[in-house]
Amino acid sequence: MSQSLPATMKVIEISEAGGPEVLKPAERPVPQPGEGEVLIKVAAAGVNRPDCLQRQGSYPPPPGASDIPGLEIAGEVVALGAGVTEPKIGDRVCALVTGGGYAEYCAAPAPQCLPLPKGYSLEQAAALPETFFTVWVNVFDRSALKPGESFLVHGGTSGIGTTAIQLAKAFGCTVFATAGSPEKVKACEDLGADRAINYREEDFVEVVKEATGGKGVDVILDMVGGSYIPRDIKAMAPDGRLSFIAFLGGPKAEVNFAAVMMKRLTITGSTLRARPVAVKAALAEALKAKAWPLLEAGEIAPVMAASFPLAEAAKAHELMESSSHIGKIVLTLD
Protein backbone atom coordinates (compact mmCIF):
# COMPACT_ATOMS: atom_id res chain seq x y z
CA MET A 1 0.00 0.00 0.00
CA SER A 2 1.64 3.26 -1.07
CA GLN A 3 1.33 6.55 -2.85
CA SER A 4 2.63 6.63 -6.41
CA LEU A 5 6.38 6.91 -6.03
CA PRO A 6 9.20 7.81 -8.42
CA ALA A 7 11.55 5.04 -9.56
CA THR A 8 14.72 6.92 -8.63
CA MET A 9 15.84 9.40 -6.01
CA LYS A 10 18.69 11.79 -5.27
CA VAL A 11 21.16 10.56 -2.67
CA ILE A 12 24.60 11.41 -1.32
CA GLU A 13 27.11 8.60 -1.84
CA ILE A 14 30.55 8.03 -0.35
CA SER A 15 32.55 7.75 -3.59
CA GLU A 16 35.67 6.46 -1.79
CA ALA A 17 37.13 6.66 1.73
CA GLY A 18 38.42 10.17 2.42
CA GLY A 19 37.63 13.76 3.41
CA PRO A 20 34.30 15.56 3.06
CA GLU A 21 34.91 16.06 -0.67
CA VAL A 22 34.25 12.32 -1.31
CA LEU A 23 30.52 12.88 -0.61
CA LYS A 24 28.94 13.02 -4.07
CA PRO A 25 25.36 13.49 -5.31
CA ALA A 26 24.04 10.42 -7.16
CA GLU A 27 20.82 8.73 -8.26
CA ARG A 28 19.61 5.44 -6.80
CA PRO A 29 16.42 3.40 -7.04
CA VAL A 30 13.82 4.33 -4.43
CA PRO A 31 13.97 1.54 -1.78
CA GLN A 32 11.00 -0.75 -1.15
CA PRO A 33 10.01 -1.17 2.51
CA GLY A 34 10.55 -4.74 3.68
CA GLU A 35 8.46 -6.67 6.18
CA GLY A 36 7.99 -4.58 9.32
CA GLU A 37 9.35 -1.44 7.62
CA VAL A 38 7.92 1.84 6.37
CA LEU A 39 9.18 4.07 3.57
CA ILE A 40 9.69 7.70 4.56
CA LYS A 41 9.87 10.66 2.19
CA VAL A 42 12.75 12.42 3.89
CA ALA A 43 12.37 16.11 4.75
CA ALA A 44 15.55 16.33 6.85
CA ALA A 45 18.38 14.07 7.98
CA GLY A 46 20.67 14.48 10.98
CA VAL A 47 24.46 14.56 10.56
CA ASN A 48 26.47 12.64 13.16
CA ARG A 49 30.08 11.72 13.95
CA PRO A 50 29.54 8.10 12.86
CA ASP A 51 28.68 9.44 9.37
CA CYS A 52 32.13 11.06 9.24
CA LEU A 53 33.79 7.85 10.45
CA GLN A 54 31.92 5.86 7.78
CA ARG A 55 33.05 8.37 5.13
CA GLN A 56 36.67 7.95 6.29
CA GLY A 57 36.34 4.17 5.92
CA SER A 58 36.54 3.31 9.63
CA TYR A 59 32.87 2.58 10.47
CA PRO A 60 31.34 0.31 7.80
CA PRO A 61 27.57 -0.21 7.79
CA PRO A 62 26.39 -3.46 9.38
CA PRO A 63 25.47 -6.37 7.06
CA GLY A 64 22.28 -5.61 5.16
CA ALA A 65 22.32 -1.87 5.89
CA SER A 66 22.43 0.78 3.16
CA ASP A 67 25.89 2.08 2.23
CA ILE A 68 24.36 5.58 1.99
CA PRO A 69 25.27 7.54 5.16
CA GLY A 70 22.70 8.95 7.58
CA LEU A 71 21.42 7.43 10.82
CA GLU A 72 18.37 9.62 11.57
CA ILE A 73 15.64 11.14 9.47
CA ALA A 74 12.31 12.94 9.68
CA GLY A 75 9.59 13.04 7.08
CA GLU A 76 6.29 11.59 5.91
CA VAL A 77 5.41 7.89 5.72
CA VAL A 78 4.57 7.12 2.06
CA ALA A 79 4.53 3.29 1.94
CA LEU A 80 4.12 0.36 4.34
CA GLY A 81 5.86 -3.00 4.27
CA ALA A 82 4.08 -6.24 5.09
CA GLY A 83 2.63 -6.47 8.58
CA VAL A 84 2.84 -2.76 9.44
CA THR A 85 -0.20 -1.08 11.01
CA GLU A 86 1.62 1.80 12.79
CA PRO A 87 2.73 4.36 11.75
CA LYS A 88 0.21 4.99 8.95
CA ILE A 89 0.64 6.49 5.49
CA GLY A 90 0.65 10.27 5.83
CA ASP A 91 2.02 10.23 9.40
CA ARG A 92 4.91 12.60 10.05
CA VAL A 93 7.63 10.82 11.99
CA CYS A 94 11.29 10.82 12.89
CA ALA A 95 13.24 7.57 12.84
CA LEU A 96 16.52 5.94 13.77
CA VAL A 97 17.97 4.00 10.81
CA THR A 98 21.11 1.91 10.19
CA GLY A 99 21.95 3.97 7.09
CA GLY A 100 20.37 5.54 4.04
CA GLY A 101 19.38 8.87 5.59
CA TYR A 102 21.15 11.15 3.09
CA ALA A 103 18.47 10.49 0.46
CA GLU A 104 15.03 11.59 -0.72
CA TYR A 105 13.48 8.32 0.51
CA CYS A 106 14.58 5.96 3.27
CA ALA A 107 13.18 2.68 4.62
CA ALA A 108 12.97 2.43 8.43
CA PRO A 109 11.82 -0.32 10.80
CA ALA A 110 8.33 0.72 11.96
CA PRO A 111 9.15 0.27 15.69
CA GLN A 112 12.08 2.72 15.34
CA CYS A 113 9.76 5.52 14.19
CA LEU A 114 8.61 8.12 16.71
CA PRO A 115 5.82 10.64 16.20
CA LEU A 116 6.72 14.24 15.45
CA PRO A 117 6.56 15.97 18.85
CA LYS A 118 3.75 18.55 18.91
CA GLY A 119 4.99 21.97 17.81
CA TYR A 120 8.10 20.59 16.10
CA SER A 121 9.23 21.10 12.51
CA LEU A 122 10.54 18.11 10.55
CA GLU A 123 13.97 19.80 10.55
CA GLN A 124 14.00 19.89 14.37
CA ALA A 125 12.67 16.34 14.58
CA ALA A 126 15.53 15.03 12.41
CA ALA A 127 17.90 16.18 15.17
CA LEU A 128 16.27 13.90 17.79
CA PRO A 129 16.60 10.16 17.18
CA GLU A 130 20.35 9.43 17.15
CA THR A 131 21.22 11.51 20.20
CA PHE A 132 18.10 10.65 22.20
CA PHE A 133 18.42 6.89 21.61
CA THR A 134 22.17 7.02 22.40
CA VAL A 135 21.80 9.09 25.58
CA TRP A 136 18.84 7.04 26.78
CA VAL A 137 20.52 3.65 26.39
CA ASN A 138 23.87 4.72 27.86
CA VAL A 139 22.87 7.16 30.62
CA PHE A 140 19.46 5.99 31.81
CA ASP A 141 19.41 2.34 30.78
CA ARG A 142 22.96 0.95 31.08
CA SER A 143 24.20 3.48 33.68
CA ALA A 144 20.85 3.78 35.51
CA LEU A 145 21.20 7.50 36.34
CA LYS A 146 18.66 8.35 39.03
CA PRO A 147 17.15 11.64 40.30
CA GLY A 148 19.41 13.22 42.92
CA GLU A 149 22.61 11.71 41.47
CA SER A 150 25.42 13.64 39.79
CA PHE A 151 26.31 13.33 36.11
CA LEU A 152 29.26 14.43 33.96
CA VAL A 153 29.20 14.51 30.15
CA HIS A 154 32.29 15.19 28.06
CA GLY A 155 31.74 17.17 24.85
CA GLY A 156 28.89 19.13 26.38
CA THR A 157 28.09 21.16 23.26
CA SER A 158 27.92 18.20 20.86
CA GLY A 159 24.52 16.88 19.82
CA ILE A 160 24.93 14.10 22.39
CA GLY A 161 26.15 16.54 25.05
CA THR A 162 23.35 19.09 24.64
CA THR A 163 20.79 16.27 24.82
CA ALA A 164 22.41 14.60 27.84
CA ILE A 165 22.65 17.86 29.82
CA GLN A 166 18.96 18.65 29.30
CA LEU A 167 17.66 15.14 30.02
CA ALA A 168 19.79 14.66 33.16
CA LYS A 169 18.70 18.07 34.47
CA ALA A 170 15.05 17.41 33.65
CA PHE A 171 15.24 14.20 35.69
CA GLY A 172 16.56 15.99 38.75
CA CYS A 173 20.31 15.40 38.58
CA THR A 174 23.30 17.63 39.29
CA VAL A 175 24.97 18.09 35.90
CA PHE A 176 28.59 18.76 34.95
CA ALA A 177 29.90 19.13 31.40
CA THR A 178 33.28 19.69 29.76
CA ALA A 179 33.71 22.05 26.80
CA GLY A 180 36.57 23.77 25.03
CA SER A 181 35.84 27.52 25.06
CA PRO A 182 34.17 30.18 27.23
CA GLU A 183 31.32 30.40 24.68
CA LYS A 184 30.75 26.63 24.88
CA VAL A 185 30.95 26.66 28.69
CA LYS A 186 28.21 29.30 28.75
CA ALA A 187 26.12 27.29 26.29
CA CYS A 188 26.31 24.22 28.57
CA GLU A 189 25.26 26.26 31.61
CA ASP A 190 22.44 27.92 29.66
CA LEU A 191 21.13 24.42 28.87
CA GLY A 192 21.07 23.52 32.56
CA ALA A 193 24.55 22.31 33.51
CA ASP A 194 25.20 23.24 37.16
CA ARG A 195 28.88 23.66 36.32
CA ALA A 196 30.57 23.55 32.93
CA ILE A 197 34.33 23.06 32.84
CA ASN A 198 36.66 24.56 30.23
CA TYR A 199 38.99 21.58 29.77
CA ARG A 200 41.68 23.84 28.27
CA GLU A 201 41.93 25.80 31.53
CA GLU A 202 40.66 23.52 34.31
CA ASP A 203 41.04 19.91 35.41
CA PHE A 204 37.60 18.28 35.40
CA VAL A 205 38.71 15.81 38.11
CA GLU A 206 39.51 18.63 40.55
CA VAL A 207 36.36 20.60 39.69
CA VAL A 208 33.92 17.72 40.18
CA LYS A 209 35.68 16.51 43.34
CA GLU A 210 35.45 19.98 44.87
CA ALA A 211 31.84 20.49 43.79
CA THR A 212 30.77 17.12 45.25
CA GLY A 213 32.60 17.50 48.57
CA GLY A 214 35.28 15.01 47.52
CA LYS A 215 32.79 12.27 46.62
CA GLY A 216 33.00 12.41 42.82
CA VAL A 217 30.26 11.93 40.23
CA ASP A 218 27.86 9.00 39.97
CA VAL A 219 27.69 8.68 36.17
CA ILE A 220 30.03 9.80 33.36
CA LEU A 221 29.21 9.73 29.63
CA ASP A 222 32.50 9.80 27.71
CA MET A 223 32.99 10.20 23.94
CA VAL A 224 36.68 11.18 24.30
CA GLY A 225 38.43 8.17 25.85
CA GLY A 226 42.24 8.17 25.60
CA SER A 227 43.86 10.16 28.41
CA TYR A 228 40.40 10.86 29.89
CA ILE A 229 39.91 7.21 30.90
CA PRO A 230 42.12 7.14 34.03
CA ARG A 231 40.93 10.64 34.92
CA ASP A 232 37.29 9.54 34.66
CA ILE A 233 38.03 6.79 37.18
CA LYS A 234 39.56 9.34 39.58
CA ALA A 235 36.53 11.63 39.16
CA MET A 236 33.99 8.93 39.99
CA ALA A 237 32.08 8.37 43.22
CA PRO A 238 31.85 4.96 44.91
CA ASP A 239 29.46 2.72 42.93
CA GLY A 240 29.88 5.09 39.95
CA ARG A 241 29.11 4.12 36.35
CA LEU A 242 31.20 5.10 33.33
CA SER A 243 29.80 4.66 29.82
CA PHE A 244 31.77 5.06 26.57
CA ILE A 245 30.13 5.93 23.26
CA ALA A 246 33.15 7.05 21.19
CA PHE A 247 36.91 7.50 21.40
CA LEU A 248 37.83 10.84 19.83
CA GLY A 249 41.04 10.71 21.91
CA GLY A 250 41.72 7.05 21.10
CA PRO A 251 40.47 3.74 22.56
CA LYS A 252 43.51 2.85 24.68
CA ALA A 253 44.78 3.97 28.08
CA GLU A 254 46.75 2.64 31.02
CA VAL A 255 44.33 2.12 33.91
CA ASN A 256 44.85 1.23 37.58
CA PHE A 257 42.03 -1.23 38.16
CA ALA A 258 42.59 -1.21 41.92
CA ALA A 259 40.54 2.02 42.00
CA VAL A 260 37.79 0.33 39.97
CA MET A 261 37.67 -2.47 42.54
CA MET A 262 37.93 -0.30 45.65
CA LYS A 263 35.20 2.09 44.45
CA ARG A 264 33.04 -0.73 42.99
CA LEU A 265 32.86 1.04 39.63
CA THR A 266 30.99 -0.19 36.58
CA ILE A 267 32.60 0.51 33.20
CA THR A 268 30.41 -0.04 30.15
CA GLY A 269 29.84 1.26 26.65
CA SER A 270 27.81 0.50 23.56
CA THR A 271 27.19 1.10 19.91
CA LEU A 272 23.58 1.09 18.77
CA ARG A 273 23.74 0.71 15.00
CA ALA A 274 24.10 -3.08 14.75
CA ARG A 275 21.73 -3.97 17.59
CA PRO A 276 18.42 -5.74 16.83
CA VAL A 277 15.21 -3.88 16.03
CA ALA A 278 13.62 -5.27 19.22
CA VAL A 279 16.23 -3.47 21.36
CA LYS A 280 15.67 -0.18 19.55
CA ALA A 281 11.90 -0.66 19.72
CA ALA A 282 12.08 -0.85 23.53
CA LEU A 283 14.19 2.33 23.58
CA ALA A 284 11.68 4.07 21.29
CA GLU A 285 8.85 3.18 23.70
CA ALA A 286 10.84 4.53 26.67
CA LEU A 287 11.58 7.78 24.82
CA LYS A 288 7.93 8.19 23.80
CA ALA A 289 6.82 7.73 27.40
CA LYS A 290 9.51 9.73 29.20
CA ALA A 291 11.30 12.17 26.86
CA TRP A 292 8.61 13.11 24.30
CA PRO A 293 6.35 14.75 26.95
CA LEU A 294 9.33 16.94 27.98
CA LEU A 295 9.89 17.97 24.34
CA GLU A 296 6.19 18.77 23.86
CA ALA A 297 6.09 20.77 27.12
CA GLY A 298 9.09 22.84 25.99
CA GLU A 299 11.18 21.70 28.98
CA ILE A 300 13.90 20.37 26.66
CA ALA A 301 14.63 20.97 22.96
CA PRO A 302 17.29 20.01 20.43
CA VAL A 303 19.95 22.68 19.99
CA MET A 304 20.16 23.40 16.26
CA ALA A 305 23.62 24.46 15.08
CA ALA A 306 23.16 24.63 11.31
CA SER A 307 21.26 23.17 8.37
CA PHE A 308 22.50 22.58 4.82
CA PRO A 309 20.73 21.42 1.66
CA LEU A 310 21.34 17.72 0.95
CA ALA A 311 23.66 18.61 -1.96
CA GLU A 312 25.96 20.42 0.50
CA ALA A 313 26.56 17.38 2.73
CA ALA A 314 30.32 17.92 2.36
CA LYS A 315 29.99 21.37 3.99
CA ALA A 316 28.00 19.81 6.84
CA HIS A 317 30.79 17.28 7.40
CA GLU A 318 33.41 20.03 7.35
CA LEU A 319 31.51 21.84 10.09
CA MET A 320 31.08 18.62 12.11
CA GLU A 321 34.81 17.89 11.95
CA SER A 322 35.77 21.47 12.85
CA SER A 323 34.04 20.98 16.25
CA SER A 324 33.23 24.70 16.19
CA HIS A 325 29.46 24.12 16.27
CA ILE A 326 27.13 23.94 19.27
CA GLY A 327 24.36 21.34 18.92
CA LYS A 328 23.01 19.46 15.92
CA ILE A 329 23.70 19.74 12.18
CA VAL A 330 20.99 18.65 9.73
CA LEU A 331 20.57 18.26 5.99
CA THR A 332 17.30 19.46 4.45
CA LEU A 333 15.44 18.30 1.35
CA ASP A 334 12.83 20.18 -0.67
Image: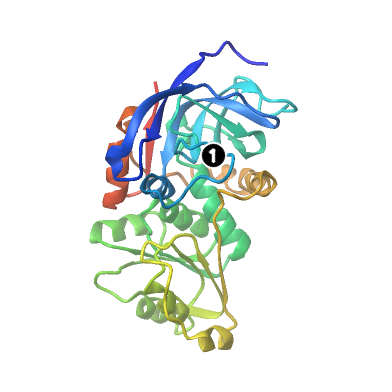
Q: Is residue 287 left or right of residue 332?
A: right
Which residue lies at the image location 54% right of the left edge and 55% below the top edge? 271
In which quadrant will I find the N terminus? top right
Residue located farthest toward the top when viewing the structure as drawn: 4
Q: Is residue 246 left or right of residue 197?
A: right
Which residue lies at the image location 30% right of the left edge and 32% below the top edge? 312
Instruction: Inspect this view and state whether residue 146 appears.
Output: no
Which residue lies at the image location 56% right of the left edge and 52% below the top edge? 272
Residue located farthest toward the front when viewing the structure as drawn: 16
Q: Is residue 310 left or right of residue 36?
A: left
Residue pointed to by mark 1: 296
Q: Is residue 258 left or right of residue 200?
A: right
Instruction: Inspect this view and state whether residue 242 appears.
Output: yes
Q: Position of residue 25 (x, y in %)?
A: 35, 27
In which quadrant will I find the C terminus? top left
Q: Position of residue 67 (x, y in %)?
A: 48, 37
